[in-house]
Amino acid sequence: MVQFGTSGWRGIIGREVTFKRVRLVTQSIVDCLRSNGTPPKLLIVGYDTRMLSEKFAQAAAELIAANDIPVELVTRDIPSPVLSASILDRGADGGISFTASHNPPEYNGLKLYLKEGILASSEVTDPIERRFAELEKTWDDTFLPAPELIVPYDPKPDYLKKLGKLIDWDAIRASGMHIVVDPLFGTSREYLDHILLEHDIPIEVIHNTRDPFFGGYAPECTSENLARLRDVMRRSGANLGLATDGDGDRFGILDKGARLADASLALAIILDYLARRRCLTGGVGRTLATSHVIDAVAKLHGLELIETSVGFKNFAPMLVDGTLEFAGEESAGLAWSKHLPERDGILACLLAAEMVAVEGRPLTELKQDLFQRIGTFHFRRTQVPLTEKIRQLLQERMKQKWKEIEGRKVIAVDRSDGLKLTFEGESWILARAAGTEPKLRLYAEGHSREEMRHLMHLARQLFTNWRQKHV
């Protein structure tokens, strides 16, 4: 059985993700794309730096070609947002990227993009899952190759040219800032660093080789994983540290002093900057699990705020049709529709560099200025293994009626994706099962650090302790 989560299909290499299953999934995708009556005229296949990603991509390209569909196969690993841009640039009918994003090295999988350059929604992937189940029963894994339909493709020049037009390079150069770049051994190496160097921005680069094991860590922009970036910044006196996850669609930003910026706050500060300096006037999207500081910034600038379930693919149609101009999620995903209808960690990093240069102040000062205008917000996310006992507890909690907890009045209950309880004063907690790994994710937000810590403690008790008493 194959399941597409919030961001594609993922599993452990050799167990869930095998060559046979890759071909089965690919055939299922082709069959479902054909089901609308118009066969695809072109599909693009990309891959990340993980073990076997390049081989999986080749296997998928061969099977697509065997279905008499032209394929453009990238010449090296590429960031996922680059595949999104390439689909739009080439007028392709869709694309597949072999990646497990920020998951540990033993994982792989794929993301499916549609002709609009957006991740496929569950309306598209559910039929693919059903088709996979049908094919699996009789699949003999043989096909007639058609190598003449596979063409090599390098999307880098067009992507960097398009991205370069969005950034105020003069401001970054004039600031004299020194930047350290950390692609975490992932796909944005020779993308994020190269575009900065091409515009004469002084940088240092670390972890810029291909390593399928990502130095022994999951390629995620966490404080632990960015320890080397922090050390290099302190040694060199750099103004800014810019990092991206394994497939380049999420960001990590270290401020002057090598302090890691909270992703939700970084999104809010960038949104505030775009509204003040770059004439952003369209709708703003955030996921259910993202800090409400985004709401406060949207309200400050008179922008419409739309909340969606977790999963960046929920923003995609609204970024395409113009309902949203900006979208963000707490797991460090940012999209600006002037660039792509998808999240792009490289864009987020460059916008942060431009913002710090134009404002002439580090992120900590920009945060303090923002809080003076909208009030303070303190947000945290943590996670625990999703055992069967915890899963059952979450289901029980979701069935309950909630009016008050420890003297806090519950003013809103959302069960659309886990259980979110909002209290008077707009503080809140959320528990939900992750869509890409067996984890229970817990979220809490308050208007002081102490309130946030208390709420996170409350969330841990409610969703991981069977004996917790509540009203």
Image (cartoon, grey):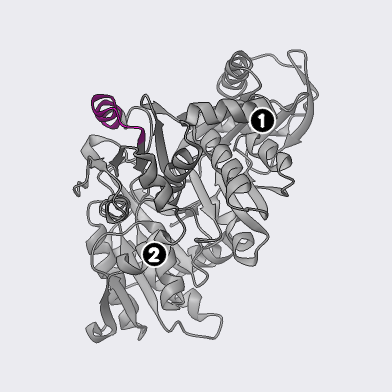
What's the magenta region?
228-240
The percent position of residue 28, horizontal first and vertical second, equals 43, 71
Side of 357 relative to 445 (left or right): left
Q: Amino acid at mark 2?
A: Leu
Is residue 229 within the magenta segment? Answer: yes
Instruction: Find residue 296 and report its image quarter.
Output: top right
Determine the CA span between mark 1 and mark 2: 41 Å
Name the magenta segment's main secondary structure.
Answer: helix
Q: Is residue 144 above or below residue 125?
A: below
The percent position of residue 194, horizontal first and vertical second, equals 27, 54
Q: Earlier in the sequence, mark 1 or mark 2?
A: 2
Q: Does the rendering let one see residue 130?
A: yes
Q: Secondary structure at mark 2?
A: helix
Q: Quadrant of the C terminus?
A: top right
Q: Is residue 327 above or below residue 92?
A: above
Which dot marks residue 83?
Answer: 2
Q: Image point 31% across, 65% down: which residue?
A: 156
Q: Image point 50% across, 61% down: which residue?
A: 340
